[in-house]
Image (cartoon, helix red, strand yellow):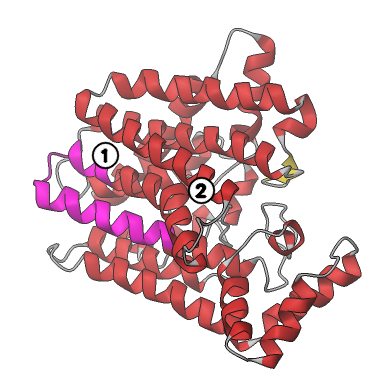
Amino acid sequence: MTQSFNSGWASVGLNSALDTADIPDDADSLRLPPGFALIAEDPELGPSVSSCLAEVEKQLRGAIANSDPLADATSRHLVEAGGKRIRPLLTILASHLGNPARTKVVQAAVVVELTHLATLYHDDVMDSAPYRRGAPTAHEVWGNSVAILTGDLIFARASILVSELGGEALGIQARTFERLCLGQLHETVGPRDGQDDLEHYLSVIADKTGSLVAASGQLGAIFADTPREVVDIMVSYGEKVGVAFQLADDVIDVTGLKVKSGKAPGTDLREGVPTLPVILLRRAAAAGDQSAADVVALVDSDLSSDEALARAVAAVRSHPQTQEAWAVAQQWADDAVAALDPLPESVVKHALASFAQAVVSRDV
């Protein structure tokens, strides 16, 4: 499960410092919310965020470097393919709610991105995904075993870095890692007997996506020495943003738009991955909606041919339950914004609110 935005880093005026970090062209797949323009225009916050992002990129590449040629090549594979760096960006933004402790904030930002990268290696093996960020996945290039071990190696690098940040950060990382594993496990085995499909689905994406987004904001707030209530706000906000982010991504899969990650529309349908639109369609069909039942029949048919998949994608896209799925994603984004209410008004608060809304307003 991955997400993409459209437009570029330059749209927020942070491109000059980021260019020095040699950010790959795939960074253009990220649309930063309009609120981030406020950051670039702020004479203090703009340069601070910009320089932190550039330093994160530099340290990220240093963290995955390895003297072993194979390990170095496999570890660099996804980093050099690009990426949105959403999680480290949230860490940096959260730190500006207090007094940023530059060294620890940047190191924490690197930790969350390394953790995210490691999960992608494992996810791609489990999903048999042929592409990631427009490039062949590691397991397609080197095989499953090498890809899994590379993910483990990157997890190890993240663990080394987080151990240097202290016990609280280490505990956050460990608990987040536990949730990431449980989310993948629960997705793999499916709902328990009698468990509601939607409840199961939401719990999976909360663990697989929400947990690390929440940890990203949490670590940024902690190392900025913000009050505990601010840290708690960032945890709540991040969890909700992460869920909204993934909900939107799953709807995008059935809208018929090809995203820059290289994931073709309908991939989840073809692979039988339960996503919000299909779950809502099955509910409607079970309640007697014949139009929903007809779409479900298409979804459950043989989708191995591109023509059959295109018909299923079109049917799901045009059904009202897909609009309902968008509404569910929007509600999670609205709840994330509401979580920010106790914070005093600031350019950072506005940017965070705008970001939460943007994760569901994108179309690719």
Disc 1 crowd rating (10 Å Cα; few below 14, some 14-19, many 20+) is many
Magenta-highlighted residues: 218-243
Front in this rendered view, residue 317 or 71: 317
Q: Is residue 231 above or below residue 350?
A: above
Are there few (<14), some (14-19), or many (20+) residues within 10 Å of tag 2? Answer: some
Give how far across and how far down residue 65 sits, in percent.
55, 17
Can residue 128 be spotted in the picture?
yes
Residue at image mark 1: 219
Specify the label residue 231 is tagged with. Answer: none
Task: Name the foreground residue: 202 vs 93.
Answer: 202
**Upstream in sequence: badge 2 or badge 1:** 2
What quarter of the picture does the C terminus occupy? bottom right
Query: x, y percentage for residue 25?
Result: 64, 46
Q: What element carries label 2?
A: helix
Quarter holding residue 323: bottom right
Residue 165 left/right relative to 195: left
Direction from residue 147 to residue 57 in the image, left or right = left
On the image, numbered disc 2 is attached to which residue? 186
Asked which secondary structure carries label 1, the reply is: helix
The reply, left or right, for residue 71 in relation to residue 100 is right
**Most foreground residue, 224 or 28:** 224
**In this picture, is 285 found above or below 208?**
below
69 vs 9, nearest the viewer: 69
Say whether residue 75 is visible: no
The amino acid at mark 1 is Leu
Disc 2 and disc 1 in contact, CB within 8 angstroms: no
Q: Residue pushed farthest front?
A: 193
